[in-house]
Structures are given as structure tokens and as C-alpha cells.
Amino acid sequence: MLPPDKLSFVVDVAHWNPPLPTNPKHFTWNLARLGYKVLATLWQGPLPAAKRFNPFCWTNQEPEEMEPNLWLLRYQWPMLERTAWGARINSGVYRRTIEKSVAALGFANQTYFLQFTPTHFEAALEASKTFPLIYRPIDDSSMAPIYQSRIDYWLAGEKKMLERAALIAPLGRKVYDALQGKYPHVRRISTGVDFALFSAKQPEPQDISEIPHPRFGFCGAIDRYKIDFRLVERLAELRPDWSWVYVGAIGMQDGTTFESLPHRPNLHYLGAKPQSEIPAYLQHFDVGTMPMNINDYTTGINPLKLYENYATGLPLVTTPLPFAVDEPTVYVAESPELFITQCEKALADRPEQSPKLIELAQANDWRQRAIELLEFIAETAEERSQDT
């Protein structure tokens, strides 16, 4: 791997303080903790009208040091993104702001720009004129609900990033299979886990303490396009003596409401929780579940839940999503009745399986994923030097 004095990163992050840290943030933290300088950039909307036509204000944002080797640049667009010329101005200002920041912070000559979604692709393409682009598609963008209202626009932007990227590091197998062979330098780097956070023992949360065992739990976004609520209701009906617990925000992406969810005495919806509290819920479930829909979007996911469950020693039962094909430790069920059978098996196997699952999660910590990215960069650089 290239040493920290030879390599730095700019990472476009969608959020900084959401309830659940995102894939970009995990890479940002772990690259910085490995000693590499990282500038995270966070879009904060357009400039106030009073500053919008003052070019002096356009690049006058200063990065804030968040921890050793890690800075956060909160930036704003000078123009509204309603015209092509406005997008060009915004992208140019963004690139100059980054150039100014990395120069002031003493970043290495080889600084990569790491992008995770088609959002703000114009800015990523402009930044790639100075910084080699690494594109890491997290999901199948063509099926993500957030992009459907302007799908042709987003997919055209993503195609440009794929063509421009020096390296492509998709998360899921579906996206990897679609890109491998079409573009040079494509390598799958899977999901990971904050092992220290999820493996540290936590007290039982108050709102789950009175829910009887056995508890079959899910932590994640509760949206209709992801969760099969007919299955959720059927499972609760088949085993009324079991508790089915769902922790997560309801309707973040598709407007699903609490009232529209199935309701039975043994179904418990506990709402969104901060990331720091999620391990406590997982640790006090008996089996983890993923009663997911099978559709064009979910077949491309590679969920964080896998290793987060495993880090707590929790076995996982899921509907037949492709990610489970790569994970022989997952219990897969094609019907409600088989889901119940697999839950029974997972519950019985847990005392023997938990230590193995914890060991597997530890080997898939986000730090390891950051190292895999560094190795990908080094190996590709070596290949290019041999070609020349």
C-alpha cells in the first residue's frame, strides 16, 4: 500500500450526523484512522441570496477538523441547480474550494476523489479533472426510489462517472457483475461493520425489556418497497407466542406510515434509534430477521445488517436475496412456513454458531474494507507503471 505521506482522499458524504452512519462515513473515518489525510465534503444547499452574486464568498468556506487526519468541508452552491450553466458554475466553485482546502492542509500529491452515488455527479466529474475519481456504487441506482423522478438524468450522470473513474469499487454482487468486463479496474469491496461498537456489551434498552422472549428482530429502514409486510403479518400470525420486533424509521423513502403497517399483539415497532443504541437492541434479540421484498432494488443490496448482526453473535434469517448466496451462514427462507422453520433452527443453533459469527464479523470490520481499497489503489498504480 502507498504510505499516508503519498496518498490522501476527498470524500463526498451525503450526511454527517444521521441516525445511522453511512457507507461514505465509515470509509472516511477508517482511512483517517489509518493515518491518511481525508477531507469530507458535505453539501448544505445554496448560498443565501445576499452572498449568491458575490464571487468572493463562493470559495470562502473553511474545513473544520473533526479528528486527527479528518476535516469536514460544509459547502454551499452559489447558484440554484435549475440550469446547465448554474450547474457548471457550482461544479467549478466546488473544485476550486477543494483545491484550496487540500493545498492549505498539506495533502499528498496523489489525492483521490471518492464518490458513492450519482448525487452531485456534475461536481464529482469536475473534481476529477484535478483528483482521480474512485466511484463506489452502493446500490443499483436504476432501481433506487430516490432517483426515479429523474431517472434518465441520474443514470446518464452515473454513466459519465463510470467512464471517467480511475477505479470502480461496487459494494454488491449485482452491480459488480453488471460492471465487470465493461470497465477497467473494477473490484468488489463488500459491506463491513464497526466491530468495536457492535461487539461491546450493552444493557437492555428499556422499551424492549418488557417484550417477551423469544424475540425475532429487525433493525433498519421500514419502507414498503423494502419490507414484505404481508410476510411480516403472516409470521406474526403463524407464531403468536413469538415477539417480532422492528427498530427503525418508518417511511424514510416511500411515505410508508405507521397506520399502514400490520398490527398484531406480538408485533412491536420501536421507531428510529441512534447508531450508538442499535447494538443494544441486536444484543437482546434472539434471532435477527430480514423479511424483505424480492424486487429489482432489493436484489442489488448488500446490507449492513449482515455483519452488524454477526458482531453481536446474532444469527440471521432472510428471504432469498442474492447477497445470502455469498454467505453460507445465513438462513434463507422462500415461504412464510419455511421462514418459521429457519427461525427455529437459527434459535437452536445459536449457542454453537454465535462465536463463529462474531469471528466472521471481526474479519469484516470497516477498517479491513478501507485496507482493501488502499490495496486496490496500490495494485492498479503498479499495473499502470508496468504498462508505461
Image (cartoon, rainbow, N blue to C red):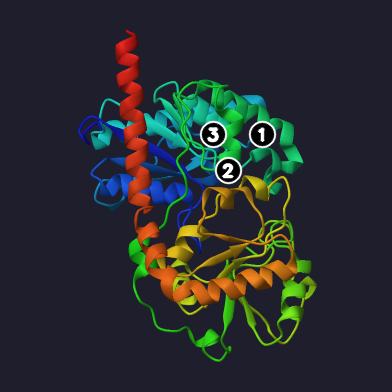
Check the image and report above or below for 252 versus 384. Answer: below
Identify residue for label 2: 49
Q: Residue at x 71, y 82 (%)?
A: 239
The residue that mark 1 highlights is 154
On the image, the x and y values in percent for residue 323 come to: 57, 49
Task: Tell me the quarter of the image containing the N terminus.
Answer: top left
Quadrant of res 138: top right
- As helix, strand or loop, the secondary structure at mark 2 comes to helix
The amino acid type of the residue labelled 3 equals: Phe
Q: CA distance from mark 1 to mark 3?
A: 28 Å
| Residue most extreme to the top | 388
Please state if 80 lies on the left or on the right of 208 as rendered: right
Residue 202 in picture, x, y percent from top left: 38, 78
x, y percent for residue 181: 55, 22
Disc 1 + disc 3, Cβ < 8 Å = no
User: Residue 141 location, x and y as percent?
Assistant: 64, 39
Q: Is residue 314 above or below residue 46?
A: below
Which amino acid is tagged 2?
A: Ala
Q: In the image, what residue occupies the spot 54% across and 65% down? A: 316
Q: Which corner quadrant holds the C terminus?
A: top left
Q: Are marks 3 and 2 in contact (CB under 8 Å)?
A: no
Q: For marks 2 and 1, give the CA distance.
A: 27 Å
Q: On the image, which quarter does residue 2 sit in?
A: top left
- Upstream in the sequence, badge 2 or badge 1? 2
Task: Identify the residue under disc 3.
Answer: 53
- Left or right of 70 in this view: 141: right
Determine the residue positioned at 62% across, 48% down.
322
